[in-house]
Amino acid sequence: MAEAYQVKTHILDADNASASATKYFQGIIDRKSEYVLYKSENLVGPDRRIDRTKFDTFLETISQLDNVVVDFGAASSEQLCYYLQEEYSNGIIEIFEELEIQLYVIIAGGGMIKESIDFFLKLKKLKGVEKIVTIVANEKEGGVNGKSVAEYTKADIQIPLFHEDSNSAAYLEWKEMMNNGMVYSDIQKLPLIRRKRITSYLDSIFQQFKKASND
């Protein structure tokens, strides 16, 4: 939605396992908005842990940018967790606060819930981390024990289902657009009602992120 708001946004892919963001941008290379600036970052060393020198340089880089989103992915998030733990005594939480860095932890329901909750509980053990963490509930794969993911985790942000009926034409169209790598210009080409349905859905999510970042 960087194009919709005409705000330059830097997307950094630090997921050294799946590199999902990199694959996405490779798929939309001819359709990418001028407002989205993408770069891949390798922050791990030969021991598969976060390299402190690389991470220091990384923090210096993002401190000079506005509107930065970093994708760590599942495997790299584990390494970030270890890094925060090891660097706690060196004031890393305070540095994140000073740089206004917020960690958005996405909790997915359904078959992904155990892995998501395990990581969340591990992260919560880090002293002071609650100051820089925002919980995001992704309802796409279903709920937990009869509750929505948002209710179960007391999440700050909820990504709701796009449509209650997964066999509906609206949901299938949305799923196809997501699988093909959707960009804002694709949405703008849709007929009025379909375009409004998608932009209203996305706006409801981004408004939650905006509110969370201002709280």
Image (spheres, rainbow, N blue to C red):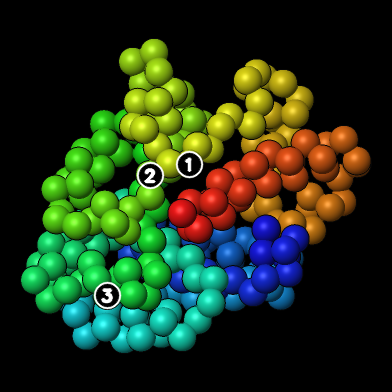
Q: Does the residue at mark 3 contact the one at mark 1 (Cβ under 8 Å)?
A: no
> Relative to 118, is 19 above or below?
below
Question: Would you say 161 lies left or right of 17 here?
Answer: right
> Relative to 184, is 139 above or below?
above
Name the residue carrying label 2.
Answer: 135
Indicate the quadrant where residue 196 lies.
top right
Specify whether residue 111 is in view.
no
The residue under label 1 is which amino acid type?
Ile
Residue at (77, 36) in percent of width and height: 197
> Relative to 169, is 125 above or below?
below
The residue under label 2 is which amino acid type?
Ile
The residue under label 3 is which amino acid type?
Ile
Question: Which element is circle 3 on?
Answer: helix
* Disc 3 crowd, CA 10 A, few/some/many (<14, 14-19, 20+): few
Nearer to me, 138 or 208:
208
Q: Does the residue at mark 2 contact the one at mark 1 (Cβ under 8 Å)?
A: yes
Indicate the quadrant where residue 77 lies.
bottom left
C-alpha span from label 3 to label 2 = 20 Å
Question: Would you say 124 lies left or right of 111 here?
Answer: left
**Residue extending furthest toward the front:** 215
Name the residue carrying label 3.
Answer: 95
